[in-house]
Amino acid sequence: MSVSFDIKTFGCKVNTYDASLLHKRLQAAGFFRHHEAPMVHVVNTCAVTQEATREAMRYVRRLRAKNPLCTIVMTGCSAQVDGRLLDSMPGVDLVVANSHKGNLENILIDYLKGSRTQKIFRSNMFRQDSLGEGGDLEEGRTRAFLKIQDGCNSFCTFCIIPYARGKSRSLSVSYLCDKINELHANGVQEVVLTGVHIGDYVDESHGKAARLEDLIEAVLVKTKIPRLRLSSLEPIELSERLLALYADERLCRHFHMSIQSAQSDILKSMRRHYTAQDVEMALESIAARVPGSFVGMDVIVGFPGESKELFQETYERLEGLPWTRIHVFPYSERQGTRAPLLENPVSLEERKWRSKMLRELSLERYKAHALEAVGQTKKIILLNSKSQKNLSGVSRDYWNVDLTNAPETTESSQEIDVRIIGFDHSQDVEGSLLGEVVYGIH
Ligand code: SF4
């Protein structure tokens, strides 16, 4: 069917892969991408907070006002958990939840032919066993985000994800190694292993269960990908075996720790399966075993029951631990989860104030680490399009580096050595390191 389409994606990297897969399947079915005036708009939503769903709804209202004749399809996590709300929204033609996302192109074709009048396609996500392959290349085509699993087996009290994406399902080690070899053959220099909860990764296709450590080991042995990076982990997922794998410098010294709090009572009421002491041990082990790593963390402030004293405990514990940056999230109620029913909610004003305090702590630490990097030489890969004037890249230890001079050629996608000559935070809050190319492209 030769009809133009465009996709707008909200939310995380997993949703971005889903979008690239939808793109491929729509193209295979005859649709073609058109950014300016498409006939079909696919809106791939995120449901992590109630506000995320509202943001997608506002986007749809704007689309409809601009183009009264187009077809609007809402898919993704909000379509799964807020399906009824989207179904009742005027201006939406189809609601295709995650449970039916794999068949979206056929549902759309039937709708456009007029052979289906049903508006909402949604069923229980927990019955899903299958997992579509994913993988998304960035504009610079040097880094790929590779989905290794989807769904989550934990039911943290603040999170709707298991209801939106179902139980954890993983792709096999052999499939992923083949996929990485294929990406590398096409010029990709870095693969980021990503999923909704990569600590849940397990491949049971060959009898003995292969966990995340087995997957990383296999990738390091069976592929020649120069850089491998992990997405988010929880403190108790940082095993001895995993830390030992960082002896191979292809595994980038960058950790993203999803800690959420550094206070044991709050962690318990979030239904996280670790304590403040586990957080301490994890961060100290990284500093001791993988020195020089960039350590980012997610922390929620103002969770119900977090008194001023308990917040202070998290703040002071984090202040004394080694890390590089904190992504601070003021707690946001999400309908359908248990946390809004907990006692002692924290006022919005207090959540805002705590966010500000922790963000200031994070910025201070981040800038101190950035200044320590000045004078060092780092290996970067370019991330933006080579035709762009202002080139920038990312180092193995996850620093964004803006180049002050262009490499001899911008044809190659390989790593470039750059000397860090400064730190600029005039453009945005966090800023970037400034680097000059010292040896040209390898
Ligand atoms: S581990 Fe918790 S926060 Fe993370 S996706 Fe699963 S339920 Fe949500």
Image (spheres, rainbow, N blue to C red):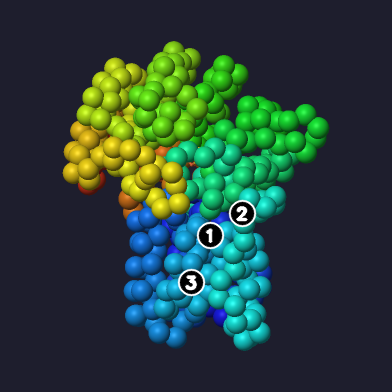
Q: Is residue 46 left or right of residue 250?
A: left
Q: Residue at x 41, y 78 (%)?
A: 90
Q: Is residue 390 visible?
A: yes
For disc 1, the neighbor class at 10 Å (few under 14, some 14 to 19, many from 20) is: many
Place of residue 86 in the rendered image (x, y in percent of width and height, measured from the top left): 45, 68
Badge 2 is on which residue?
A: 125
Give the class, few, some or many, for how many residues have Cα within 10 Å of label 3's Cα (few <14, many ≥20): some
- In the image, residue 247 sits, relative to residue 422, either above or below, namely above
Query: What residue would you read off at disc 3?
Result: 87
Kind of residue at badge 3: Asp
Kind of residue at badge 2: Met
Disc 1 to disc 3: CB gap under 8 Å: no
Instruction: Give the spatial CA distance, label 2 vs label 1.
Output: 8 Å
Amino acid residing under circle 1: Gln
Location of residue 33 with respect to 16 vertically, above or below? below
Label 1 beta carbon less than 8 Å to ligand 1: no
Foreground residue among 66 and 272 = 272
